[in-house]
């Protein structure tokens, strides 16, 4: 039987959660609450839904370059359309960048724990992920810069970081960027950019017009509530994106996704409402965790990371009560900030587990 290269066999596949309906059937429960995937609990903008309903040309292939969506993004960001690349989620832009700029034996520096797709994409081309432990749950940018060698081709920085929700501030980001050689591509993953409230948050766009090689990733999956349509984008110099477009699939983003994303950009009220819902839920959960004496990491995103022992048991027992969260290794869980009633369900279920009354 044909076998893939060893570096492919070494990749641990991403394991998605089961559909809610299947979990309910297996566990004999109903009315479950999903707080595992950092989705917007409010859902998509009404403008995005209307755009989908009014899109009739799905018998035609989509616009391969996403002309109208990149036009809207270029106007919003103040950059040229050829300084944008669309992806089937920002995940695909990660994959395209790695395939374009890395090959067997190259290295990419990244934090751990962080978004698992970075390491998977690097391993898929025979590269080596150089994983630097977080410092106080935050990307240790100085240590990441220290880890750069002549074999380093890329550096990945999730800001805010997933799964911890922490961010890097401008001063430390600037200090790291000074040390980046011109042979290294820095990928700044800002999937949760719209949720950030800290005024010292590192503004990566500051380096967009510099001599640094940088690609900034953003997505419509989180704040804009379009996770099911898989649409994201990258911001970078046209020379970098021109190379990446050589291997990008011709029709990698579908018509409905493009139309919905373009409409979502116009609905600033939906963004404000989503942000307010997140801030209200965050405050409620912080207060409840403090009352329970439970450790948590303050977040700048729409989820909260909780160091906690025996996370697999807690995950299972929460599931039995119809609450779906994400275990993050043996000693931590991550919970998405949901609607108020969802947050209350989670807190009550967690109380049941911790008091052993369930």
Image (cartoon, rainbow, N blue to C red):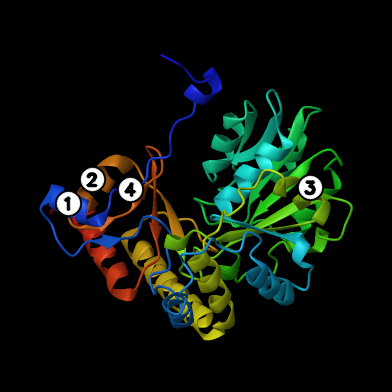
Q: Mark 2 points at which residue?
A: 316
Q: Mark 3 points at which residue?
A: 176
- Check if mark 4's residue and mark 1's residue have beta carbons within 8 Å: no
| Residue 80 locus on image (x, y percent) | 79, 68
| Residue 279 locus on image (x, y percent) | 47, 74
Which of the marked residues, 2 or 3, is nearer the chain's N terminus? 3
Q: Is residue 87 left or right of residue 78?
A: left
- Check if mark 1's residue and mark 2's residue have beta carbons within 8 Å: yes
Which of the marked residues, 2 or 4, is nearer the chain's N terminus? 4
Instruction: Give the Cα separation between the discs numbered 4 and 1.
Output: 15 Å
Q: Residue farthest to the bottom?
A: 269
Is the residue marked by circle 3 packed among few (<14), some (14-19), or many (20+) residues within 10 Å? some
| Residue 25 visible somewhere in the drawing | yes
**Residue 284 occupies which quadrant of the picture?**
bottom left
Q: Looking at the rendered structure, which numbered label has been put on residue 320?
A: 1
| Residue 191 visible somewhere in the drawing | no
Q: Name the residue under label 4.
A: 17
Q: Which of marks 4 and 1 is in front?
A: 4
| Residue 99 locus on image (x, y percent) | 66, 37
Residue 237 vs 283, above or below: the answer is above
Is the residue marked by circle 1 packed among few (<14), some (14-19), or many (20+) residues within 10 Å? some
Question: What secondary structure is found at the residue carrying circle 4?
Answer: loop
Question: What secondary structure is found at the residue carrying circle 2?
Answer: helix
Name the residue located 17 percent from the left edge and 51 percent from the top edge: 320
Q: Is residue 36 left or right of residue 267?
A: left
Instruction: Give the Cα separation between the discs numbered 2 and 4.
Output: 13 Å
Please tell me which residue lies in front, 123 or 71: 71
Q: Residue farthest to the left?
A: 28
Which of the marked residues, 4 or 1, is nearer the chain's N terminus? 4
């Amino acid at each position: 039987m044909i076998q893939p290269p060893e570096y492919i066999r070494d990749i641990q596949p991403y394991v998605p959660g089961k559909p809610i309906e299947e979990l309910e059937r297996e566990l004999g429960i109903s009315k479950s609450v999903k707080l595992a995937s950092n989705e917007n609990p409010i859902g998509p903008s009404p403008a995005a839904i209307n755009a989908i309903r009014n899109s009739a040309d799905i018998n035609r292939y989509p616009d391969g370059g996403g002309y109208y969506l990149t036009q809207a993004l270029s106007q919003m960001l103040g950059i040229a359309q050829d300084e944008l690349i669309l992806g089937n989620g920002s995940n695909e832009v990660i994959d395209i960048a790695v395939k374009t700029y890395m090959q067997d034996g190259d290295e990419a520096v990244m934090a751990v724990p962080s978004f698992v797709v970075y390491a998977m994409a690097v391993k898929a081309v025979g590269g080596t992920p150089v994983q630097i432990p977080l410092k106080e749950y935050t990307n240790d940018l100085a240590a990441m810069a220290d880890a750069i060698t002549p074999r380093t081709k890329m550096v990945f920085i999730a800001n805010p970081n997933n799964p911890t929700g922490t961010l890097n501030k401008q001063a430390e980001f600037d200090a790291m960027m000074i040390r980046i050689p011109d042979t290294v591509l820095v990928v700044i993953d800002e999937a949760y950019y719209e949720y950030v409230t800290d005024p010292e948050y590192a503004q990566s766009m500051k380096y967009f017009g510099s001599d640094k090689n940088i690609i900034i990733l953003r997505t419509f999956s989180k704040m804009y509530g379009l996770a099911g349509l898989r649409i994201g984008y990258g911001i970078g110099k046209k020379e970098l994106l021109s190379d990446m477009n050589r291997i990008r699939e011709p029709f990698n983003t579908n018509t409905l996704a493009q139309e919905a994303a373009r409409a979502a950009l116009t609905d600033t009220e939906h963004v404000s409402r989503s942000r307010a819902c997140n801030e209200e839920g965050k405050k409620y959960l912080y207060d409840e965790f403090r009352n329970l004496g439970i450790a948590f990491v303050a977040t700048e995103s729409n989820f909260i990371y909780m160091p906690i022992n025996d996370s697999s048991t807690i995950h299972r027992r929460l599931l039995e009560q119809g609450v779906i969260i994400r275990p993050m290794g043996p000693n931590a869980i991550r919970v998405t900030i949901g609607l108020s009633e969802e947050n209350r369900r989670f807190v009550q279920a967690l109380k049941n587990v911790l008091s052993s009354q369930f």
